[in-house]
Amino acid sequence: MNLPHVPLEAGASPENPPCPACGEPLFPWVGMPVASGIAHRCEACGLGVLSHGEKFDFPRRAGEDEAEAPVGGAPGRTSPGVPGTPPTGTSADVVVDNSFDPGTAEDALAELELDRDGDGSYLFDNRASFACWLTGGAWAGLGTDRRYRFTPHAVTDLVASRDQVVTRTRQRPLRGIAVMWQSGLNMFTFGQNIVMGAFGKAHRVEGDRPWKRGLDWFISIAVAIPAIVVAVPFELIAILFRRGAASRAEIQVL
Ligand SMILES: [Zn+2]
């Protein structure tokens, strides 16, 4: 079957601003845990760009309330974007209003810098990982207070903008298994990253009711063993295919 090839650029609009890493348009991806925001992603380099405090239901129906001003400050974008052509997959009777500020390459690099290891390499949970693909909105990387979720491709593009090259991207099996395991648990809990968050290994997003927070611990304990039985082989297979959940990018200045 011959399908017409549509370049990604055709999707560029105020609702699909350019990716800070590679310049291709960003598209809505998933809602963040406990309705804490919206995640967009770049279909080219895989960078995830998170908007905290925005409601998940990004395809608004006509007549619904306008979105409140973007949280986190977005000068120059104070007025809601003019609804443009709905992205592929939405029907024409919904008004799409999800314009947001994706920031710049400098913003993304500054955040990457926060997880620089002692040897100069960058540590990040891989948005292009098998764990992320498998668990979607439950992926542990979405329980975060950060704005960007990196991939090896996105890191390569970002550091290139300041004349650095990624010499090697390594897998981090232990953290990868933990992220795969926690992402699996997140599929059953109200909150996100309950266990890794308790150990300071991830950002914990708690359930919005006390009973949910209590139940989340019960669920985490009940599912812990079955989840590890699945997570270990899955993550090891992912690492074989270089789709591990946790990465280390070694860089070199040109
Ligand atoms: Zn990109």
Image (cartoon, rainbow, N blue to C red):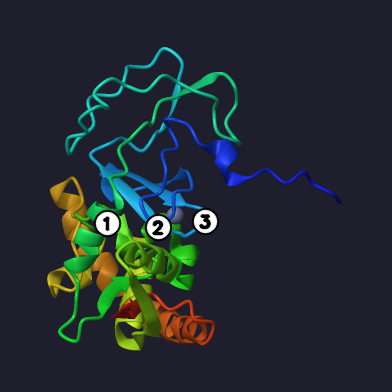
Q: Which mark is residue 47?
A: 2
Q: Is mark 2 within 8 Å of ligand 1?
A: yes
What's the CA distance linking mark 2 and mark 1? 10 Å
The type of residue carrying mark 1 is: Ala
Q: Can you see residue 146?
A: yes
Of residues 135 and 90, which is closer to you in this image?
A: 90
What's the CA distance linking mark 1 and mark 3? 16 Å
Which residue was labeled with disc 3?
Answer: 44
Q: Residues within 10 Å of mark 2 (few under 14, many from 20)?
A: many
Q: Residues within 10 Å of mark 3 (few under 14, many from 20)?
A: some
The type of residue carrying mark 3 is: Ala
Marks 2 and 1, the one that precedes in the sequence: 2
Q: Is residue 19 above or below residue 183?
A: above
Q: Give the structural element (helix, strand or loop) at label 1.
A: helix
Whether residues under marks 2 and 1 lie with C-beta atoms below 8 angstroms apart, the answer is yes
Which residue was labeled with disc 1?
Answer: 108
Residue drawn at x 54%, y 28% as measured from the top left = 86
Q: Position of residue 209 (x, y in %)?
A: 17, 46
What's the CA distance linking mark 2 and mark 3? 8 Å
Figure quarter occupied by ligand 1: bottom left
Q: Is mark 3 within 8 Å of ligand 1?
A: yes
